[in-house]
Image: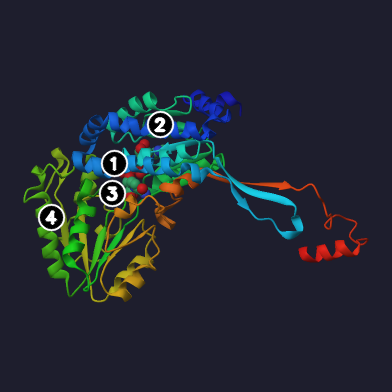
Amino acid sequence: MSEAANSTPFSAQVQSIRDYHGTLDTQNLSWRKDQLRALQKMLQENKSAFLDALYKDLRTNPTEGNLLQLSLVSSEITHALKHVGGWSKPEKVSTPLYMKPSSAQIVHEPLGTALIIGAWNYPLLLTLSPLVGCIAAGNAAIIKPSEMAPATSALLAEMLPRYLDKKAFQVIEGGIPETTDLLKEKFDTIFFTGSAPVGRIIMEAAAKNLTPVTLELGGQCPAIVDRSADLKLAALRIVFAKFSNAGQTCVAPNHVFVHKDVADEFTKILKQTITDFYSTDPQKSPDYGRIINQHHHTRIVALMKDQNIACGGKSDVDDLYIAPTVLTNVDPASPVMQEEIFGPVLPLVTVNDLSEAFNHISKNNHPLAAYVFAKDKKVIQRAEKITAGAVGINNAMLHLGVHDLPFGGVGGSGFGQYHGKAGFDLFSHAKPIFKGGSFEAGAHFPPHKEKGRIKKALLKIFL
Ligand code: NAD
């Protein structure tokens, strides 16, 4: 096929970015630091505009938007600025005796031109956080924010080119047709955050160019509340993680397994905590968000059907509102337990023994995170063995704010990790450079039959 037949409306744009990356300018450490500083400046100087956009897209409370999106990206940038010099340094590697004198090192080289496809649920955080590692490692990038959060997408498209080097970074807005076109272009790495079905489409398109991909997918993150748990603390942390952003958080607890001895008491404390956070009428609370669109609203409401509603349950499609809802005595076989809820509905499954919960978790797809609330050391030791993107003990969700903890899934929840150094490594190729010494013992050269004593002795070290 000719080049013209393969071209898309974005071919020239992508090629210009690739060409600029080819100049090696992006590998310059001071250029990378300048870009990181510029990204941080963009957030500082346009803070209220970004908070307004998040409010428009998801009715995100400004404090929550600042805490869970702007500040997180900004502190990630500060961390990268502090460490990027160290991360980028070539690492010396020792060489075997029989190869002396020689030297070996690992240099961290950018992968090249990245395509970053952002998600709608934290449209600022999940678009810019991967960009931090991408810039730190010296890549160029096309950034595709989610069209499902249009206000944030438009603002990113307006602001990023004003602050970042346009020769290396460009924003392309759009939905399925634009993403489909972009995926026909050749990138050196693709970073996608979203659902598994779209992840498969991304991976299939990437395979045509043998482009490596990172898939940050979802999964039904389980929580377990043991009878030894501090129930009040567990409720505070679970309610915060579950109902922030109206439950549209990839690392929110999807459901809770609660030990039968504390199920009633825990339900009571959960209900009280929800009221403490969002009042008796959460629809009027300035701290409570909205569902992204009607499609997801209808989907989430349907999941509550025929369930025992302990609190919440109210919905208003015109306002895209669903109350923070707790379902009790949920059957693990019921529809609400079969898919990721990604909304403000929290099923509680009462278990007679925690092994029921651990078995359920190990039989299903590996989640992006699993949370266990307990004081009992044996339970905690068992919890640490859960296969998941991350495990939180007496915590939910906040691991994503620890820069030095790699963030990402395993198995069904995706692959590839970022944040902090992991983000730098994800967008880098650890390239070995081996330099031969000026002296050559030649023990490995033929003819092998006619070697002298020294060569034979040296060869023995090889074999
Ligand atoms: P989604 O993942 O399906 O994303 C929709 C996006 O995909 C849109 O931008 C759309 O343009 C694009 N898209 C859809 N069909 C496409 C196609 N055929 N070709 C190319 N692009 C296409 O949206 P969703 O299901 O609402 O997202 C929710 C999921 O994302 C949940 O599973 C959640 O857990 C996951 N998620 C994961 C993380 C993480 O960090 N791991 C973060 C946020 C969300």
Q: Residue 386 appears in which quarter of the rendering?
A: bottom left
Q: Compared to 128, does 326 lie above or below?
A: below
> Which badge, 1 or 2, is on the more N-terminal residue?
1
Viewer can see residue 291: no
> Which badge, 1 or 4, is on the more N-terminal residue?
1
Closer to viewer: mark 1 or mark 2: 1
State the image coordinates of residue 201 (x, y, percent, origin top left). Answer: 45, 43
Q: Residue at x 22, y 73 (%)?
A: 228
Badge 3 element:
loop
* Label 4 residue near ligand 1, CB within 8 Å: no
Residue 402 located left or right of residue 230: right
From mark 3 to mark 4, how far is it between C-alphas? 17 Å
* Label 3 residue near ligand 1, CB within 8 Å: yes
Closer to viewer: mark 1 or mark 3: 1
Q: Residue at x 7, y 48 (%)?
A: 281
Closer to viewer: mark 4 or mark 2: 4
- Residue occupied by mark 3: 249
Viewer-nearest residue: 95 or 229: 95
From mark 4 to mark 2, how far is it between C-alphas? 41 Å
- Residue occupied by mark 4: 274
Closer to viewer: mark 3 or mark 2: 3
The residue type indicated by label 3 comes to Thr
From mark 1 to mark 3, how far is it between C-alphas? 17 Å
The residue type indicated by label 4 comes to Ile
Badge 1 element:
helix
The residue type indicated by label 2 comes to Pro
- Residue occupied by mark 1: 71
Q: Compared to 382, does 152 lie above or below?
A: above
Q: Residue at x 45, y 44 (%)?
A: 83
> Which badge, 4 or 2, is on the more N-terminal residue?
2
